[in-house]
Image (cartoon, rainbow, N blue to C red):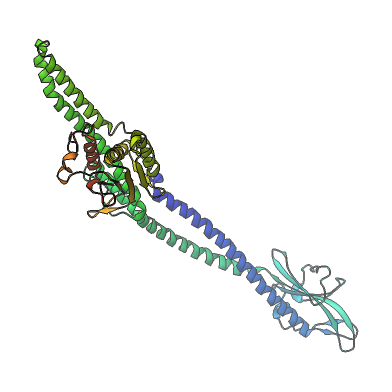
Amino acid sequence: MRTKSLSFRLLVTEGVVLTLFFALVAVVLEQSFRDSAEEALKERLQVQIYSLLSTAELKNTGDLTLPANLPEPRFINPGSGLYAYIQQTNKKLVWRSPSSIGLDVPVPPEKLGIGNTYFIADNPRRYFLHYGINWKNLSGVEKEYIFTVAEDSEFVSQQVDRFRKALWFWLVIIGIILIFLQFALLRWCLKPIRIIVKDLNAIENGEKTLLDGEYSSDLQGLAGNLNAFICHERAHLDRYRNTLADLAHSLKTPLAILRGCSESFSDNKETVQEQISIMNKIVEYQLQRAAAKGEHKSVKGIDLSAFLHKVSVSLNKVYIDKSINIKINVPDQCQIYFEEGDLYEIVGNLIDNACKWCRRTVNVSVLENPRKDRRNYTLLLQIDDDGPGIPDGKLNEILKRGVRADENIHGHGIGMTVVYDLVSILGGKLEGNKSIELGGMSWRVYLP
């Protein structure tokens, strides 16, 4: 199970990245240090060549001589690691240092050129610096020579080895420190996720009802969607429980009456028909209430702008005789995670009522992330019309089951009840007031 941990995966991934990064840094730094050490060695060999030039003397006979006691003692001791050679341009050996006895004479490069230097590692154990010179003494004798100074690679190798050991030691120390820092940072960064997981476990155990903790801004949307999902699930369960209970209770009395009339059906035909009609209305009402939820599969994202335009087009066809102007003001890319059936019931009933009562105009607007009564909501849906509105004393009455604002208008009187029940079960808020803009009714629905 540990390998499936998000923290473990991130830590291992970062560990691998750090290892590759440090390995690359080590290779680059080591090569840079080697180049620097070789450049320093080249400068030292150049100084040795200048030292030999200062002690050499070109005789009038054309012979080049050097004293027995050279400025650098290492040229005198065999196997000291520092060697010198002087050759003519035709590669004829003129002089070699006592330290080079037993070693092969290096071959200078072709066409070195007077005054030019050439630095090379002829083999892994030795570095060479060749220097071309045109020598002319006071008597006018002139000859060309190639001065070559060589040194064993131990000088560079030892420095590079010391640098490599120190480099890897500190890189390992820094890597370990960075791993611990990354672990601490991951623990701190993933703490909000652990809090959500803990709260979800608390909800599962019945200790909480919703995700109500203080979460980071990046997880607010996730927490809101999970809360919406939880509310939808509970609404789904509560609605069917209530619907079945209400249906059973409502049918109890008509069934009892029918049972009493069954013995003399012909004498109570009118009563039987009346009770059957009542039962039919009860079933119709309960089915409509249950249909407000329908079969629940998953809560998916809905483009609210497209959804509202779809509803408005449908209602314009229903009320084509009134030529209603339905104005919709929705922010761009307004995505809401909601059960489509519930949204149809809420939006459809409210806009249908507005179209039913308006004269010519219905305004539908949406505001994202509103705050009401010290609580944050996902969105505010406001529907205004220019109709006569609802009398102040009857606003709360129409939210009751079977009550209509005007008994002369066709309807079952349960549309606003379904809206009110849905909004309440989902944890939202429904408000009704007089429309300031149009003068008719204004419904404001706060959804979580």
Q: Is residue 193 visible?
A: no
- The answer to whether 21 is drawn above or below residue 71 in the figure is above
- Give the farthest residue toward the bottom: 138
In the image, 411 versus 377, the foreground residue is 411
Picture quadrant of residue 150: bottom right
In this image, 56 relative to 199: left or right? right
Rendering coords of residue 187 (x, y %): 36, 55
Viewer-closest of 383 and 159: 383
Q: Is residue 377 visible?
A: yes
Q: Position of residue 26 (x, y in %)?
A: 56, 62
* Residue lying at 53% horizontally and 56% vertically, measured from the top left: 20
The residue under the point 69% across, 65% down is 125
Q: How far across and down, in percent of the image, does residue 288 sit?
A: 25, 30
Q: Residue at x 14, y 44 (%)?
A: 393
Q: Residue at x 22, y 54 (%)?
A: 373
Q: Position of residue 412 (x, y in %)?
A: 22, 31
Residue 136 sits in which quadrant? bottom right
Image height check: is 122 above or below 388? below
Q: Number of marks in the image?
A: 0
Quarter occupied by the N terminus: top left
* Whether residue 250 is situated above or below residue 321 in the rendered picture: above
Res 202 quadrant in image: top left
